[in-house]
Image (cartoon, rainbow, N blue to C red):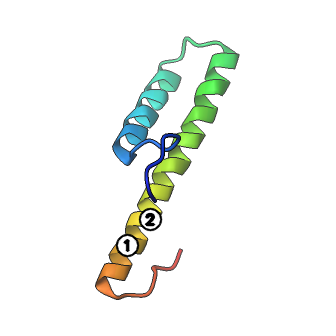
Amino acid sequence: MSETPATPPFEQARDELADVVRRLEAGGTTLEESLALWERGEALAAICQRWLDDARTRLDAARGAAPAPE
């Protein structure tokens, strides 16, 4: 997965996701804020998963192996 302005690097997405989780676990936010955090967390988790899937594909290709089953 190539990085674009809309797609943060893996490390940035991971760190922001960890922050979202901390904020949700801490509580003290309104329902609307919690929903917005949850939605952002879902989006960040999907970004991280795409980075990891791409890394797996690249590793498999470098090893000459078939893609790993899901």
Report if the CB atoms under discs 1 and 2 are less than 8 Å apart.
yes
User: Is 46 left or right of 55, judged from the image as shown?
Assistant: right
Which residue does the numbered mark 2 point to in the structure image? Answer: 54
Instruction: Please name the residue shown 44% across and 65% down the image.
Output: 54
Q: Local crowd at mark 1 within 10 Å, few (<14), some, or many (≥20)?
A: some
Q: Position of residue 20 (x, y in %)?
A: 48, 29
Instruction: Please name the residue shown 62% across and 22% down the image.
Output: 34
What amino acid does circle 1 point to?
Arg
Q: Position of residue 17 (x, y in %)?
A: 45, 36
When asked about the image quadrant of residue 43, the answer is top right
Front residue of 48/1: it is 1
What amino acid does circle 2 point to?
Asp
Compared to residue 68, the image places residue 6 above or below, namely above
Compared to residue 31, the image places residue 10 above or below, namely below
Q: Local crowd at mark 2 within 10 Å, few (<14), some, or many (≥20)?
A: some
Count of numbered labels shown in the rendering: 2
